[in-house]
Image: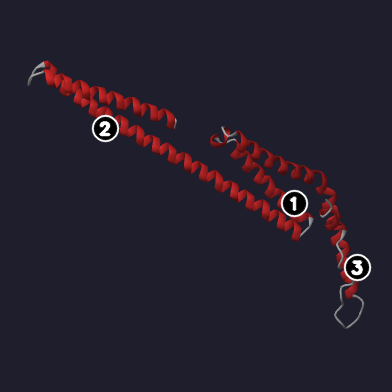
Amino acid sequence: MDAPGLGKLAAALGCLALLSTAGRIALLNIGRPGDTPTETGKWLLQIASVFAGTGVISSVLRQADITRNEREAWAHLLRELITAQDKVQLAIRLLSAHATAKTYFEQIRQLSEVREVLRRITSSPQVHEDAALRGALARMREDLTLLVREYEVHHLPLARQQRLDEEYLTQRLKSLVRTGSQLSPSIPHSLTEPLPAWQMLNDP
């Protein structure tokens, strides 16, 4: 039962407790010790105690428990969302600082995991009834989906270009070492420029 339903139950039980108490008082006023009205009044007093003690209090405690559980569920969802945001920001920084096919693959995998976290949050009972929040999460997930699809289309040529760049760089560096000079070779300006794989990753 949800919190509003428990509130109504507590109010109903409270009313029953008040009615039982009122009946007890009326019966005790018209009865004498040991007769039927007096015994009935005592019985109603016990009923009132049951309603007030176990019914109302239990309902209120249960309502507080439900509220606490809902708050904890929201706190858990918020922690998941913050962790997901941190992963996305880290992926952006790593791709900017180390634009390689390997980094691209690793960070897209992280973004795919974030997309699944967003799907799980969107399908949670807490978010289900909040259309605005559900819509915002769906847009975030769609943005990540576009990145994953872009990866699926472009990763293979990028990975091949990355291997070619690395082989080219290896051969050029070996040729610099083989010059026979006793001095430590310096990197020529042509090798300080971005290679095609890096250019592909930075192409909007």
Residue 119 rendering spot, x and y as whole percentages: 63, 39
Q: CA distance from mark 1 to mark 3?
A: 27 Å
CB contact under 8 Å: marks 2 and 1: no
Q: Nearer the viewer, residue 190 or 63?
A: 63
Mark 1, residues whose alpha carbon is within 10 Å: few (<14), some, or many (≥20)? Answer: some
Amino acid on which disc 3 is placed: Ser
Under mark 2, the amino acid is: Gly
Task: Give the label on residue 190, or none.
Answer: 3
Q: Count all numbered tags in the image, as a single digit.
A: 3
Q: Secondary structure at mark 2?
A: helix
N-terminal of the pair, mark 2 or mark 1, is 2
In the figure, 122 relative to 182: above or below?
above
- In this rendering, does residue 91 appear at all? yes
Q: Is residue 199 above or below residue 192?
A: above
Cα separation between marks 2 and 3 = 86 Å
Point out the tag, 1 or 3, that comes first from the N-terminus. 1
Picture coordinates of residue 13 (x, y %)? 31, 26
Residue lying furthest top: 36
Q: Which residue is label 1 attached to?
A: 105
Outermost right residue:
179
Task: Specify which label sits upstream in the sequence, 2 or 3.
Answer: 2
Residue in the picture at 71% in, 53% down = 106
What residue is shown with label 2? 53
Q: Quick check: 167 left or right of 9?
A: right
Disc 1 versus disc 3: nearer the observer: 3
Residue 60 versus residue 173: which sits nearer the camera?
Answer: 60
Residue 127 versus residue 32 in the image, above or below: below
Disc 3, SS: helix
Q: Quadrant of residue 61?
A: top left
Q: Secondary structure at mark 1?
A: helix
Q: Measure the C-alpha gap from mark 2 to mark 1.
A: 62 Å
